[in-house]
Every structure is written in structure tokens, then in C-alpha cells.
Amino acid sequence: MGEVILTMKGIDKSFPGVHALDHVDLEVRKGEVHALMGENGAGKSTLMKVLTGIYKKDSGTITYEGKEVEFHNTREAQDAGIVIVHQELNMLGDLTVAQNVFIGREFKKGIRIDDKKMNEEARKLFDRMHIDIDPTETMSRLTVGKQQMCEIAKAISHDAKVIIFDEPSAALTENEIEELFKIIRDLRKQGLGIVYISHRMDEIKVITDRVTVMRDGTYVGTLITKDSTKDDIINMMVGRVIYEDPKTQNMTPKGSPVVLKVDHLNAGKMVRDVSFELHKGEILGFSGLMGAGRTETMRALFGADPIDSGDIYINGKKVIIRSPQDAVRHGIGYLSEDRKRYGIVVQKTVAENTTMADLDDYSNGPFINKRKEHDVAEKFVKSLDTKTPGVDQLVVNLSGGNQQKVVIAKWLTRNSDILIFDEPTRGIDVGAKNEIYKLMNQLAAEGKAIIMVSSEMTEILRMSDRIVVMCEGKKTGELDISEATQENIMNMATREID
Amino acid sequence: MANKSVSKTAGTNRSFIDRMGGQKFIVLIIVIAMFIFFSAMSPGFRKYTTIVSILDYSYYIALMAIGVTFPLLTAGVDLSIGTGLICYSLIGGYLVVHQDWPVAAGMLVTVLMGVIFGVINGCLVALMDLPAFLATLCTCMITRGFGAFVVGGYGIPWPTATAPGGWFRSIFKIQVNGQNIPVGFLWIILLVIIMSFVLNHTKMGRYTLAIGSNKEATRLSGVNVKFYHVMAYVICGFFAGLAAIAYSAIFATVQPGSGAGFEMDAIGGAIVGGVSMTGGVGSVTGTLIGVFVICLLKTGLPFIGLTANWQQIITGLVLIVAVMIDIVKRKRESGK
């Protein structure tokens, strides 16, 4: 490790209602690979966005190559030599490799673009990285791994001094990861500072020199990788904080019947052989890291995405679910993690959204009974304490928490017995969160069976009666709440698979 | 986090204009203003016969526009209604004129053809996931060729008012004491009332709007979106069929190869009347009012000495303004 190239000190950033970064520190040296770790929502991405000028920090200093700097956009950061290689690749699939690498700064011959020179330069670049990619190849024909190499090449060609890898291995195969590591080691040898964001504990051990851990927007500490164990890091990630009233015992009534049984469900790459049971009156938490396949499982179960194989039983009877229509008919309601896109119809009113899943019961033949619709919407606005000037208000005008209540009302109107809450409190402020929690407990007590997908450990521990943990599309564990701890959940969530 | 502020914009304090129906209300005032303007500028425009001819001219555009409002509300479009109208009219008229079918049967076939092409468009868009623009552009070409093919390239003169079978022309215009009475307008009003009801008080209308504002959320609510999406195009085709009858009844001869561009008058009318190109927002009454803006421009401008070329230019400019208003409104609502 060489001298310090980048220091972020006391970085503070708030969004309305959320203190995203609370005096966070990060130090990167030349010739080191520095892991940045933390749970989902710990603030890693926000910190990197502050660094590269996407967000403006509220306070704190960034020192880069001995000078205090503040970038106003990614372009400025790039010009200074700080580049991000994103998890999602920003590639133009129809252009060639060289055209992609030099996009925005094409070589020119007069007013003409000099493709020949670009191809030559790209080839030189790849030679230097010891990778074998044809610069004239169309980008979309490369594998994801190769595309990532191009992205890295692009970063290097900017004369990067600091490269940030944001979960680079998420979409790569074993071999591609090996190749990626070779390149990263090479860059390290050349004296670049590398920030490596990843959830994969094993990779951290292999490739990084130091680890900085963040939790809930705060800086927890920095470790030397080779002197620390996986457990050290996990402990730092989850912390020792006692959160408000976590559930201590399973509240499901004894002998409660199984209402939903999922047997060896497979759907695409993200749902592999998932089996679980859900009881009446139970809240079943689904924990795991981002990309663990939880949402995909729920979407498959709900018929939103096609199922490859596996059986679903409701109240002991095998059912075929091919579309959301089927799922809704069998009494399943789905509250999406992305309300605006999948949950509500924003340009419609509270009343119209409330009856969206059950319009047949609020119609006489093809005609909608607006009075009845109005009444049921009023009823749920009252019972869920939804804050809206009236049921004729467009839902776009409501706050996140109240929009969520409208979605809940939608499924209660339908009288769905199985409710899937996918990240039920995402984007909802603290006060409204508690209300949603109270509501979910109440629904479970009334005999609804609830699945709750959540990336927030506190939420999982506070709400669940039982917990299913997933990692990389597979179920890696199942716990009763009485035996669940943050540590053993995180262990299962990062469990290495084959 | 970052989208927190979104929900707070687009406040609840509705202005007078909003309460009166928003854009619709403004456009209605524009229609009246245009009428007064043209009347003041040209004595010829003030005549009863001119008003009747404006209405004559408006029927088929209005019928197309009522229909195309539905695909537009699903965030789609139907470009085939113009050439389709001519195609359906040619086929129905061919059976009447050359095959001696009763006029009523010919009319039925005309409407049926519209429904059939509506089903085809609906399947292409809703089931096969073709972009609406492309799918209906193709059926636009197909109907244009198909109509001409069936009649062998000759114009079809549906029976004149005095000829046997000419009764159908009196659906839209009757003569009382030598005066033309534009009764077709009453039919248009009636259909607007019916389709407004369909849009606002039936599942069909509710889901049309829901698909246009958020198709995926509607699907995830367990709604059979495919069916209702197809139906929006079927309604459109049905009204294109009705428009074909109106066209046949008003004009002496139906010419193969014509009809291209009619759809633009109808779509333009709907958009001027407040139907959003991005779907989910709009009304049938708004569409009708918008159609009259287009019709007044078409018929009024020649009276103040502007040629057909000017009509095109001015209509185009009006549409740009209407679309810009829609975009500005959207941006304000999404808080950007």
C-alpha cells in the first residue's frame, strides 16, 4: 500500500426525512483494494454518489491527491481521475467495443470520426490489461463479463487514479470473476486506489486489503482484511444495537393450518428450488441481501412472472397460477416493493384504486356502482387511518405511507387471505412505518397469512414469526424468531453456494 | 428517498377552470371565440347553410375521434381509422351498389368491417405486443389497399337521397320545408353521452384509463388487461365503421385510395380536447370539443381568405400547442 490518495472525512448527507450519511469517513491509499461493506441501505452507494458529484454533501471534506475537492457531476470526477464501474453496465449494445470505450471523446480526423484510430487505441488498452477482446466487435455480442472488462477499460482510459467497483461480480461467472480479479490485482500493482463494493464475504477475503464497514449511514470502522475473520466483519455490519421491541416469540396460534405451501419452485435464474410453508395468522419474513431472489420468488408465486417448475398448494389444494388474475382469484394479494410502478395507478383516485382488484363486486354487470365503491373506500380510509382529503383524491397527491395504505385497502377490499408485503416500508417515513407495522400485526391477528420481504434486519426481527433466508436464488435457511439473531441471519444470507 | 417531494406537488386547491373541466373548458371557450371571430370576419360564414356544412363535415371526424379516444387513453393510438373508414365504406357500398344488397345490410357490413379491423389491431397491440404506432400504420396501409382491391379501383356512389335506399342519408340530414336540418348532430351528442358513461361508469372505461396510466399495476391487481386492451381497439374500430357510414351519407362518392390523413383530424381533435398522448387522462366530451376546433379551422379559414395550405399549417401549430400544454401539465404533476 502506498500513500493516501483519497480521504473522505465527516461526510454528512440528509434527504427529507432520512439521515443517509452521518459523518462517514473513508480513506483510500494508492495500490490498495479497499472494500466498502454494509447491509442494504447502509449508505455505501450514497457515499460513492457524494464522492462522484451525483449528490451534494451537506458537510465534511473530500481530499484527493492532497487537495480539497468538490465535484459537481460525474464528468468532473472522471476528469480528475475518479471513475465508477457500475453494477448495471451503461453500454450501447449496437455500437462497437471501441466506440463504446471512447464514447463522448471520439478521435477525429477533421470532422470525421476516426474509427481506425479508436480501434487501435482500444486494442492497445486491452493489450495493457492482458485481455482478449476485438475492438470492432458489436458490444451486445460480448458476454456480460467481457462487457464489464470494456467498462473497466473505459475507466482506465480516463487516466483513472481511483476506480470504484459497485458490486462488479453480481452478474459474472466463476471464470469471469477470476479474470476480473486478475485485472484488479494488476491495477493495484500500477498504484491505483480501488474501492470495491460487494456483499460476497469470500471475495472480500480474496481480493481486498482493507475493509470499511458502514451501518445505517454511519461509519463503523476499518479493518485490515487479512487480520480479520468473516465474523468480525459481520458483527460490524449488523452491530450490537438493541432495536425497539424485536419479536421474541412466534405469535402464530398453535396448530394454525398451512394456508400456502410452495414446493420446489423454480422460475428463471433467480428462483431456484424454493420451498416453504405459510400458516394462517403468521408473518413469515423473507430476509436476504439485494438480488437474493426474494422479490422474484414472490412475483413467480403471484403469477407476475412465469414459473418453470414447482407446485403451489393453497389450503392443501394444488393450484395452477399462470397470471396475477389466477393468484388474485386464489386469494393472494401482492404489495410491490415499487409502489409507483406496480402498486398504484397514480392518476386515479383513492376510491378507484381501492376497488381495482375487486371491481366485479362493486359493479352491476358492466356498470360500476360508484356509491358502493365510494362507501368501501371511505370505510378503509377510516379503518386504516389513511390521510387523504377524500376518497376522490388522486393517489399521486398522497404521501408514501398513505399510498401504501391505499394498496393495503385494495387487497382487503378483495378480501385476500394471503398478503405478500414486499419491502412494505420502503420510502416511508418513521412515523408511518410504525402504523404499517401495527396494521400488519393486526391483520395477522385477524387470521391473514402474511409474507414480508424485507432488506431491513430490524424490520425482519421486529415483525416476523418465522424467517426464511435466501441467497442467490436459493433458500439458505429457515428460523423461528426465538432462535433468530442478526448474526445467524447474515450468515445464512451470505452463505456461499457451490 | 429522492422521490419524496413528488407526492407533495399537484396540490389540492383546484382552480375555477379545473372545476369546470380543465382544458375542456378552455377549449370550449376557444371554440366559441373562433366561431365569433370567423362570423365577424366573414358574412359568408354567418349563414345557416355554412353551419350545416360545418356540422356535415364534422360527423365522420367526430365519430372517428370518439373511437380513437379509447386507444389513446391506453397510451396507444390507431392510425388505421382514416383509410379504414374508406375501406369499410367501399366494401359496404360495393355490396349495395354492385351486388344489390339492401342498404341496411351494406351498412351492417360496413360497421362489421370496422369491428374486424379493430379486433386485428387490438390483437397485434395487446396480445403480440407490437407498438401501436407500427401495428396500426400497417393496418392503415392494408385497409387502403384492401378497399381499392375489392371495388376494383372505381369510386362507389352510395344511393343518393332521392334514389331507392337513399333513406340512410336522412340519418344525418333531413329536409323540412326545403331547409336542411342537421339531425346527425343529435346522434353525435347521444353517442358522446353514451361513451362518456362507458368511460366513467363501466369496468371497460375504468380499465381503459387504468391501463393507460399504469398497465403493470393494473395487471398486478388481477385485471384481465389483455382483454380490455383489445377491447379499446375494438371500440375504436366500431366507431370507425360508424364514421364510414357518416362519410357515405354526407359525400356523394367514396373514392378508393383516399382517407389517409383523416385519422390526423380525429387524433388531433382528441388531443386538443385534453386526451393525453401518454394515456390515462382525457374525456369523450373533451374530444368532441377538440374536434370542433379542428373542423372550425378547416371550414373557417377559407372564409377569411386562407388557402388549404394555411389550414394545414395552422392546424399543425394548434396541435403543437395542445401537446405542449399536455407535456407541461405532466411535468408539473410529476414535480420535475
Image (cartoon, rainbow, N blue to C red):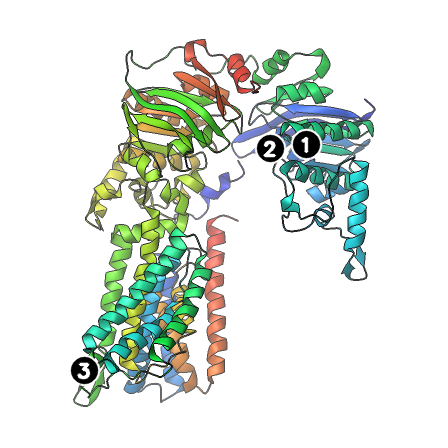
Identify the element where label 2 is drawn.
loop
Quadrant hosting residue B164: bottom left
Q: Position of residue A432 (x, y in %)?
A: 41, 29
Question: Given the image, on which type of amino acid does mark 1 rest?
Answer: Phe
Q: Which residue is mark 3?
A: B165
Q: Nearer the viewer, mark 1 or mark 3?
A: 3
Q: Are marks 1 and 3 in contact (CB under 8 Å)?
A: no
Residue at 37% across / 46% down in the picture? A394
User: Chain letter of disc 3?
Assistant: B
Question: Given the image, on which type of amino acid does mark 2 rest?
Answer: Ala
- Visible in this render: residue A179? yes
Q: Nearer the viewer, mark 1 or mark 2?
A: 2
Q: Give a yes or no on whether discs 1 and 3 share a subunit.
A: no
Q: Position of residue A441 (x, y in %)?
A: 34, 21
User: Chain letter of disc 1?
Assistant: A
Circle 2 Cα neighbour tier, 10 Å, few/some/many (<14 / 14–19 / ≥20): some
Quadrant hosting residue A132: top right
Q: Position of residue A426 (x, y in %)?
A: 47, 31
Residue at 35% across / 73% down in the picture? B87
Residue at 18% across / 81% down in the picture? B167
In space, the residues marked 1 and 3 are separated at their CA atoms by 78 Å
* Quadrant for the N terminus of chain A in the image: top right
Say which mark, if any, is on residue A165.
Answer: 1
Say which mark, if any, is on residue A171.
Answer: 2
